Image: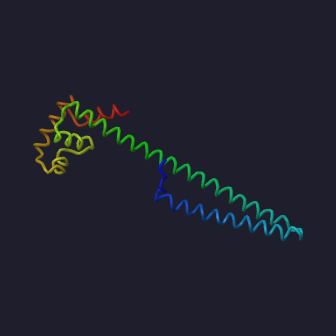
Amino acid sequence: MPARTLPKEAIVPLAAVAVQLAAALYFVVDGLADWAELASRGAVGEVLLECLVALALFVAVGLGAHVLRQTLQRAARQEEALQVARGALAELLEARFTQWRLTPSEADIATFALKGCNVAEIARLRDAKEGTVRSQLSQVYAKAGVTSQAMMMALFLEELV
């Protein structure tokens, strides 16, 4: 299993948890040292409170680290699901374009249309005339059995959902 890399956005929260952990450990050790020193003099109440606060900080750091870990794991799962969905969409596009017998140029135009581009944008991106794009888009719609960009998008959305 490949090792996961730490996302950049996790570095600051992880550093904050590390600093909090160091502070919590310092206060716990300091509280225990004070306890050992002051217990012999009978001043246990103040030291006990200091130790309890330090332990509460230590527990809070642990909970914060746990929540951060869960958040990072959830983000990793969502990224994996997004990659799967991207792959599924690419496979679906390829299968439908083959089924409809689109030419490479028509497939290119259909892809831009599915991304939400209008005729002018597709023409600009392909360095083509708008009339050519309209003609090819009409051919794509005819081969797909739809009459509009929205209907073509709906076909793919329905299959993915």
Residue 98 % position (x, y): 22, 33
Residue 23 % position (x, y): 66, 66
Q: Residue at x 47, y 45 (%)?
A: 77
Instruction: Indicate the quadrant where residue 119 lies.
Output: top left
Q: Is residue 45 left or right of residue 154?
A: right
Q: Residue at x 70, y 67 (%)?
A: 26
Q: Is residue 142 above or below residue 56?
A: above
Q: Residue at x 34, y 31 (%)?
A: 159
What's the colour scheme? rainbow
Residue 109 % position (x, y): 19, 42
Q: Nearer the viewer, residue 134 or 82?
A: 82
Q: Is residue 116 left or right of residue 140?
A: right
Q: Nearer the viewer, residue 118 or 161?
A: 161
Task: Locate the C terminus and report the quarter of the image it occupies.
Answer: top left
Q: Is residue 141 above or below residue 128?
A: above
Numbered disc total: 0
Residue 9 % position (x, y): 47, 58
Q: Residue at x 63, y 63 (%)?
A: 20
Q: Is residue 27 left or right of residue 146?
A: right
Q: Is residue 39 above or below residue 88?
A: below
Q: Residue furthest top?
A: 145
Instruction: Indicate the quadrant where residue 35 lies.
Output: bottom right
Instruction: Indicate the quadrant where residue 33 lies.
Output: bottom right
